[in-house]
Amino acid sequence: MTSTTPQWRVARVDRTQVLLLDCGATRVERAVPLKPGGLLERTVGEPTVPAVGDAVVLADERALLLPRRSELVRDTADRTSHTQVMAANLDLALIVEHLDPAPSLGRIERFVTLAWDSGATPAVVLTKADLHRDPSAVVAEVQRVAPAVEVRSVSAVTGEGLDDVRALLADDLTLVLVGPSGAGKSTLVNALAGAEVMATGERRSDGKGRHTTTHRRLLPLPLAGGTAWVIDTPGVRAVGLVAREDALERGFPDVVALTQECRFRDCQHDGEPGCAIEAAVADGTLDADRLASWRSHEREAARQRARMSGRLAQEIKAQGRQHARRVRDLKRVGKFRR
Ligand SMILES: Nc1nc2c(ncn2[C@@H]2O[C@H](COP(=O)(O)OP(=O)(O)OP(=O)(O)O)[C@@H](O)[C@H]2O)c(=O)[nH]1
Ligand SMILES: [Mg+2]
Ligand SMILES: [Zn+2]
């Protein structure tokens, strides 16, 4: 084992407690109660809501969260600007979609942007290859919306493509699986582990109940040369974007390269002369849908950023009001005394 793995990591988060996993030799699990509000103390900074994958030190029976080296954050589409940390301390984000029914290219694009923003490397895994006539055609289609990202197809039924996914893993690497419900995330985890470590959506013979994943979970994943750490997550349909500009640039390198060829640096790609984007759409080099995605990602991320700063501004204003009230009260007391 390498020495970089922290001994304790958050394996599951519930309302009132977290389950810690000893990632050293023992693999012992241990429940630790949370503070009110589901918070856990940190070694640095205010207490925070823990995320699966967080590294923890236990000191005098107290659990302290260590700083995160990466986190996958999505917008929960709340009225307020609440965001949710889906997983922490990741190296690889496997974006899992089924080949049949057809994968959602829009969702893949969004997850690619989120993954680049998280600090992890995205890769796309298209499952249920056994149900599709021509997986390589879909791989090529997905590759177009995910340039510079590994795209693989697998079948948990035939085992086809599993080695291609294993090739992305390494000792001590942490990966998360994200994608819609029924994509086959838990099935893929089991296939990689070579054992049934997660319950899957297999319909029971009595036709009752489906074992969809309800909690995010960190598990050890034994490899030929070591152990990787895998985080399985419940399916998500919609992916709210929270992204910095550089994440968008990494998700859309094809579009960004073109913008650099526009005549004007601040080109809005809206009828300006010498616009390389419009020229590329006209000659078919750039897909109009791809351009539309890029524009909508930019708008959404900008909106999310504005909401975030709006909330921050509101908090500061509220603090200011409180302060003003206090000053007023003090003055009133002062007047009263005089
Ligand atoms: N034919 C076929 N079926 C698959 C494959 N992988 C998964 N399935 C089936 O797809 C269904 C859903 O699989 P799960 O692994 O539970 O899907 P999931 O992504 O974990 O779903 P959630 O936990 O709800 O997010 C199950 O019935 C699996 O047996 C595959 O490669 N081929
Ligand atoms: Mg699952
Ligand atoms: Zn332009």
Image: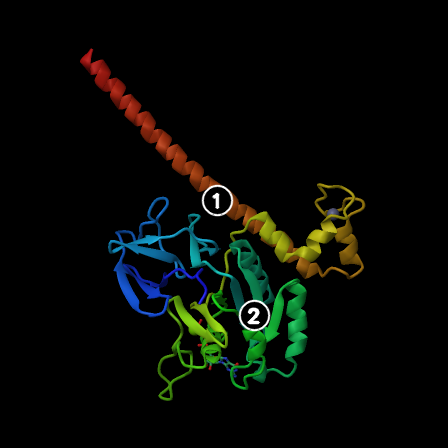
Q: Which residue is mark 2?
A: 168
Tell which circle, 1 or 2, labels the residue nearer the N-terminal end: 2
Q: Is residue 228 above or below residue 55?
A: below
Q: Of all residues shown, which one is farthest toward the left?
A: 337
- Where residue 252 sits, quadrant-wise, is bottom right
Quarter occupied by residue 12 = bottom left
Q: Which residue is mark 1?
A: 307
Q: Residue at x 68, y 76 (%)?
A: 137
Relative placement, left or right, of 156 versus 272 is: left
Residue located at (33% from left, 25% from top): 324
Q: Is residue 143 left or right of residue 20?
A: right
Q: Is 335 placed left or right of 48 in the picture?
A: left
Mark toward the viewer: 1 or 2: 2
Q: How far from the left and from the top, in percent, is residue 95? A: 54, 67
Vertical relation: 273 (above or below) 70: above
Image quadrant occupied by the C terminus? top left
Residue 100 visible to an observer of this rendering: no
57 above or below 188? above
Amino acid found under the numbered disc labelled 1: Arg
Secondary structure, mark 1, is helix
Apparent side of residue 79 relative to residue 267 in the rendered image (left or right): left
Q: Position of residue 331 (x, y in %)?
A: 27, 18
Relative vertical location of residue 207 with respect to residue 277 in this rendering, above or below: below
Task: Kindly report the distance in space between the C-alpha atoms of the residues bearing marks 1 and 2.
Answer: 36 Å
Give the class, few, some or many, for how many residues have Cα within 10 Å of label 1's Cα (few <14, many ≥20): some
Secondary structure beneath label 2: loop
Q: Amino acid at mark 2?
A: Leu
**Residue 263 seen anywhere in this rendered image of the structure:** yes
Q: Residue at the spot x=45%, y=69% of the render?
A: 230
